Image (cartoon, rainbow, N blue to C red):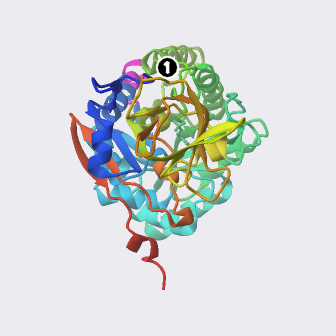
């Protein structure tokens, strides 16, 4: 099995987090998303422990909530005592609705509107990660009006290409995010922030990309960012207190992806961090990481019901499912890989090669091509693994398809944490 929370029952059914998925499908209906809460918690704890141990005990993770932004995930993050990264007023609102302590939130995004800036300041968001000079000026102006000093970090583009999918790399000089060191603009940003009336510059942020399977991009980022901090110190006499290295550790979607040992990787990056601080004679900044995918991806599983198995003679086979790009647009967007099982007969005879097709009126509505699977019949349960990140958060109502529910499994107890959307929900904003 692709991850340790998946197994096969005596009846040859797929089990997830210790429960038979075919029974969960019967109880809650399909499409159905499952969330393994123990796995989420253990990942959060792993990052927290690794950061404290290898970077200094004031270092901590901020869960990148765009991967899955729902009330329950903020409750879990709150109880695990970690921070969060948010990218919109909507995410701030969701976190606030469960009393997440927003002083532990970092507000990201390359275009925060005046509304967003006001909303975040009013709700006590701890840090803004400022993207550009105009934004710093807007934050300072609004903070002045509200009589507060807003803490900020500056988002820097360190000029690193982690060589993953171009749509998810963000650290290269010409990225739409942040301000590059190479062009000198990052130093102008620092000057703006240091002179702005109502902002307190606390440090710097970078995020090189996503789905990184080893630490070389993080190690490069540590060296480049600490050197930048040293240069800023020499130029302006200002020493950064926080270094935020972003998110991006990868997750295994298919057998051919490596299984990554986060703790070992943090150890490696931590030792370069400590050496470099010493070499540059720098006071060690507090380090933040913003893992998203690696916290929730393999904690998720999606269940569908097979509607048909169709063979186009001489060409290919299609398995039609009762969901698709509306709950998981990642194959359509990035050609992402997924592991698919016939949950009703996992290991019987995985000889059939099939394309898993969604139900939308789009030829591109595919979950995966060329899957080896036990030939399913109408009514069999089809499971797609590793769907916890960037699935529900990217879901839509295209074709007026309702979003699926999310059922959390904690200690083998299953409970609904997000209800299935109703038809009434579909029209609730319409006049
Ligand atoms: C998307 C994003 C993350 C999380 O990335 P993952 O690959 O999901 O870990 C963290 N920080 C920033 C700024 C991001 O944009």
Q: Quadrant of ligand 1?
A: top right
Q: Is residue 53 magenta?
A: yes
- The answer, for residue 290, to whether it is visible in the render is no
Q: Which residues are magenta?
A: 50-59
Task: Report the residue at 29% width, 25% height from top.
Answer: 9
Task: Report the residue at 57% width, 39% height from top.
Answer: 205
Relative to 282, residue 120 above or below = below
At which x and y percent is residue 168?
A: 64, 39
Q: Is residue 420 magenta?
A: no
> Residue farthest to the right?
183
- The answer, for residue 312, to whether it is visible in the render is yes
Q: Which residue is mark 1?
A: 260
Q: Quadrant of residue 2?
A: top left
Q: Magenta segment, principal secondary structure?
A: helix
Task: Report the residue at 37% width, 22% height from top.
Answer: 4
Q: Residue 397 vs residue 263: left or right?
A: right
> Residue farthest to the front?
313
Disc 1 residue lies near ligand 1 with CB under 8 A: no
At which x and y percent is residue 253?
A: 52, 29
What element does badge 1 sit on? Answer: loop
Q: Pick the residue in front: 198 or 173.
A: 173
Task: Report the residue at 30% width, 37% height from top.
Answer: 37
């Amino acid at each position: 099995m692709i991850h340790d929370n998946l197994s096969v029952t005596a009846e040859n059914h797929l089990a997830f987090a210790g429960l038979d998925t075919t029974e969960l499908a019967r109880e809650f209906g399909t499409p159905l998303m499952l969330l393994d809460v123990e796995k989420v918690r253990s990942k959060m704890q792993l990052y927290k422990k690794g950061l404290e141990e290898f970077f200094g005990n004031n270092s901590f993770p901020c869960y990148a909530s765009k991967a899955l932004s729902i009330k329950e995930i903020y409750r879990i993050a709150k109880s695990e005592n970690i921070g969060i990264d948010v990218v919109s007023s909507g995410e701030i609102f969701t976190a606030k609705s469960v009393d997440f302590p927003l002083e532990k939130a970092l507000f990201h995004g390359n275009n925060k509107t005046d509304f967003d800036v006001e909303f975040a300041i009013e709700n006590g968001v701890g840090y803004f990660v400022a993207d550009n000079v105009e934004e710093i000026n807007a934050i300072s102006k609004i903070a002045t009006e509200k009589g507060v000093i807003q803490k900020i970090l500056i988002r820097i583009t360190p000029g690193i290409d982690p060589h993953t999918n171009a749509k998810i790399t963000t650290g290269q000089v010409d990225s739409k995010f942040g301000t590059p060191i190479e062009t000198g603009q990052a130093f102008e940003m620092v000057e703006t922030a240091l002179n702005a009336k109502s902002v307190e510059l606390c440090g710097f942020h970078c995020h090189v990309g996503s789905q990184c399977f080893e630490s070389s991009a993080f190690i490069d980022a540590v060296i480049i960012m600490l050197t930048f901090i040293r240069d800023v110190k020499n130029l302006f006499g200002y020493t950064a207190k926080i270094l935020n290295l972003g998110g991006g550790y990868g997750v295994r979607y298919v057998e051919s992806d490596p299984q990554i040992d986060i703790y070992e990787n943090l150890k490696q990056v931590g030792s370069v961090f400590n050496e470099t601080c010493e070499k540059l004679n720098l006071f060690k900044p507090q380090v933040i990481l913003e893992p998203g995918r690696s916290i929730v991806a393999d904690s998720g599983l999606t269940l569908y019901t097979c509607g048909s198995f169709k063979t186009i003679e001489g060409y290919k086979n299609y398995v039609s499912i009762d969901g698709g790009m509306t709950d998981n647009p990642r194959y359509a967007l990035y050609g992402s890989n997924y592991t698919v099982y016939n949950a009703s007969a996992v290991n019987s005879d995985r000889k059939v090669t099939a394309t898993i097709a969604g139900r939308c009126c789009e030829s591109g509505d595919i979950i995966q091509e060329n899957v080896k699977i036990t030939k399913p019949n109408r009514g069999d349960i089809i499971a797609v693994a590793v769907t916890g990140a960037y699935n529900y958060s990217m879901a839509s109502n295209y074709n007026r398809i309702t979003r699926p529910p999310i059922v959390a499994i904690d200690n083998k107890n299953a409970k609904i944490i997000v209800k299935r959307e109703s038809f009434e929900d579909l029209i609730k904003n319409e006049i």
